[in-house]
């Protein structure tokens, strides 16, 4: 069991570039989440999904889009990256609403 | 607005000492979870408390949920260097899919 995996682990973008972060889970969890973590601010929810084909906005959704075409995958897209999106991004999944399992994170720097 | 306040923000103590960290809110939660995050990794769930006044023990770690289900504490007995990490609390409310996260307590245990 790999649990929750994220690709890539690191990425450097220039302002205005686009990219997609991939999250995959092999635990057959219904719920999946994308967070960003910034120093002193804890985890902030970007978007989440309660099942295949569904997505919803979290606390800080602006500048991001998501898709959940397959139950095991949750993609996070940045259409036009900005320096304010420099952060560490975590994906999580859960069988129920609580007790989330996290991936190892993606460190993104936008220059 | 930080709905879950964690204190202290930072704690550095010697191996063998005891410590308590706190997670406080003015809101009532249906459950509260504690996670530990090590540098470069995602958070890992330690425990979930559900009932007001509930106490759970995990080896040298004792978790308590307040009677009114608005606050929680984590007590570590005889801290060890392996306890070093960022401790996060997260509260769940029945009315919302999102967890409410605290900003974390960074704990360093010196040998």
Image (cartoon, coloured by chain):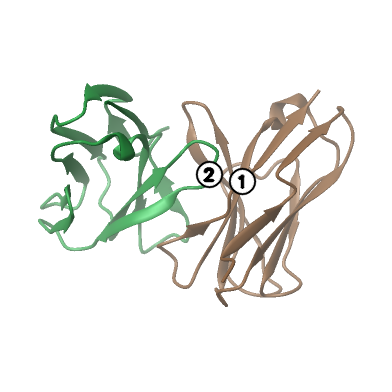
Chain colours: A brown, B green
> With B43 as the anchor, is A82 left or right in this view?
right
Viewer-nearest residue: A9 or A99 = A9
Disc 1: which residue: A105
Q: Which quarter shows the C terminus of chain B?
A: top left
Is label 1 in contact with label 2 (beta carbons under 8 Å)? yes
Q: Position of residue A111 (x, y in %)?
A: 81, 23
> With B79 as the anchor, is A3 left or right in this view?
right
Disc 2: which residue: B41
Residue farthest toward the right in the current orientation of the protein: A17
Q: Which quarter shows the N terminus of chain B?
A: top left
Viewer-nearest residue: A53 or B80 = B80
Task: Give how far apart the Cα atoms at labels 1 and 2 are.
Answer: 7 Å
Mark 1 crowdedness (10 Å alpha carbons): few <14, some 14-19, many ≥20: many
Q: Chain of mark 1?
A: A
Q: Position of residue A2 (x, y in %)?
A: 59, 66
For image coordinates 14% across by 29% down, the residue present is: B17
Q: Position of residue A12 (x, y in %)?
A: 80, 32
Q: For numbered disc 1, what is the local secondary structure?
A: loop
Q: For numbered disc 2, what is the local secondary structure?
A: loop
* Among the 4 quarters of the image, the one containing residue B6: top left
For image coordinates 84% across by 45% down, the residue present is: A19
> With B61 as the anchor, is B48 left or right in this view?
right
> With A72 as the anchor, is A82 left or right in this view?
right
Q: Chain of mark 2?
A: B
Q: Is residue B83 above or below residue B17?
A: below
Mark 2 crowdedness (10 Å alpha carbons): few <14, some 14-19, many ≥20: some
Q: Is residue A84 above or below residue B3?
A: above
């Amino acid at each position: 069991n790999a649990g929750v995996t994220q690709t890539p682990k690191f990425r450097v973008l220039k302002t205005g570039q686009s990219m997609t972060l991939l999250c995959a889970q092999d635990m057959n969890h219904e719920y999946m989440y994308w967070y960003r973590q910034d120093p002193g601010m804890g985890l902030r929810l970007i978007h989440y999904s309660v099942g295949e084909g569904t997505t919803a906005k979290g606390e800080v959704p602006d500048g991001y889009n998501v898709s959940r075409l397959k139950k095991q995958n949750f993609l996070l897209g940045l259409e036009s990256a900005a320096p304010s999106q420099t952060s560490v991004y975590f994906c999580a999944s859960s069988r129920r609403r609580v007790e989330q399992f996290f991936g190892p994170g993606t460190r993104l720097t936008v220059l | 607005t930080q709905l879950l306040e964690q204190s202290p923000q930072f704690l550095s103590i010697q191996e063998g000492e005891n410590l308590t960290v706190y997670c406080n809110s003015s809101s009532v939660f249906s459950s509260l979870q504690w996670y530990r995050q090590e540098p470069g990794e995602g958070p890992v769930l330690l425990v979930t408390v559900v009932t007001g006044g509930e106490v759970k023990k995990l080896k040298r770690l004792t978790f308590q949920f307040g009677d009114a289900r608005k606050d929680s504490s984590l007590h570590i007995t005889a801290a060890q260097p392996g306890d070093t990490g960022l401790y996060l609390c997260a509260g769940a409310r029945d009315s919302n899919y999102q967890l409410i996260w605290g900003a974390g307590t960074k704990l360093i245990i010196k040998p």
